[in-house]
Image (cartoon, rainbow, N blue to C red):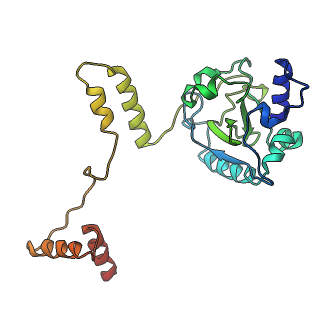
Amino acid sequence: MSIKDAARARAEKSGEGGKGEDLKNLLKRSQKRDNQRWSFGFRYFKEIENFGLDSDRIDKKWTLSVMYRLGELSALTLESVLDSRTVADGTLRMHDIDWKWRSIPIKRADIDWIGDDYVKNAEEFPFFQISVSKAMGRLVGFMDEDNVFQVVLLDPLHNAQPSKFNGYVVRMCKPLGCEITSIRYSAVNALKKIAGRPCGCDREIESAFQWTKRQPGEAFIIPVADGTDVEDADKLIAQGKAASYLDIFEAGLVALA
């Protein structure tokens, strides 16, 4: 079912069908431009249990396949995506997420990080899955009010809609993350446990995540023969010939290269 057909079906079910509303009114979309290309956003992307990249079943090339797929789909016009069943059912293999589907391991309400405006307006912002390829899972997301498809979850193991293809079984995977996101995830969970304590340690830790240019960061040490080298460097910076010690260091590397 295409996005337009899904919207019309929901309108008819609620008694609003047959009034001539177009897709823009049904889904409260912004005005489309002529030949506007379809675009994607990752504003609400997140890895969660059963929708992550940490699994022996997931080939390390999968993420690259997603990038190429997004490149292909970005060549489509928005009009063809919204109005053409051939594109939606064929090129995209795109359809609504059936939250009552057999063995589905997630509910719409679980995707609470996107905000109530989207979570609680299922008729205006239904979730869809888009095929990466038959054997390489799906992208799960929704069309926002600017007609941008917001990718919310990656589904490399078909867990959003378990089917005969995988024996209606949810295949386990977990968030892969990276060093920085992993640390932040752990810190956020720790903050939730200590929030509201009289000591105020939660606010102090949270403020530590707010970086400013005045805060110290990584530094490198350059051995010098005497203090005059540092004084000379300070003069160059004061004269505006260099912005920092790093600029002087890099200029020296270029001169010796």
Quadrant of residue 183 within the rendered picture? top left
Please say if 167 is above or below 249.
above
Residue 34 shows up from this direction: yes
* Residue at x 42% of width, y 33% of height: 185
Does residue 171 appear to the left or right of 206 in the view shown? right
Q: Which residue lies furthest to the left in this view?
A: 226
* Residue at x 31% of width, y 53% of height: 213
Most foreground residue, 246 or 91: 246
Q: In x, y percent, where is residue 59?
A: 62, 43
Please say if 14 is above or below 86.
above
Quadrant of residue 166 within the rendered picture? top right
Q: How many labels does the image show?
A: 0
Most foreground residue, 239 or 105: 239
Q: In x, y percent, where is residue 229?
A: 14, 75
Q: In x, y percent, where is residue 1?
A: 84, 32
Does residue 5 appear to the left or right of 70 in the view shown? right
Please say if 37 is above or below 115.
below
Residue 94 shows up from this direction: no
Q: In x, y percent, where is residue 212?
A: 32, 49
* Residue at x 83% of width, y 34% of height: 4
Does residue 59 appear to the left or right of 250 in the view shown? right
Q: Residue furthest right?
A: 18
Quadrant of residue 167 within the rendered picture? top right
* Residue at x 73% of width, y 17% of height: 100
Please say if 213 is above or below 93.
below
Name the quarter where the C terminus is drawn.
Answer: bottom left
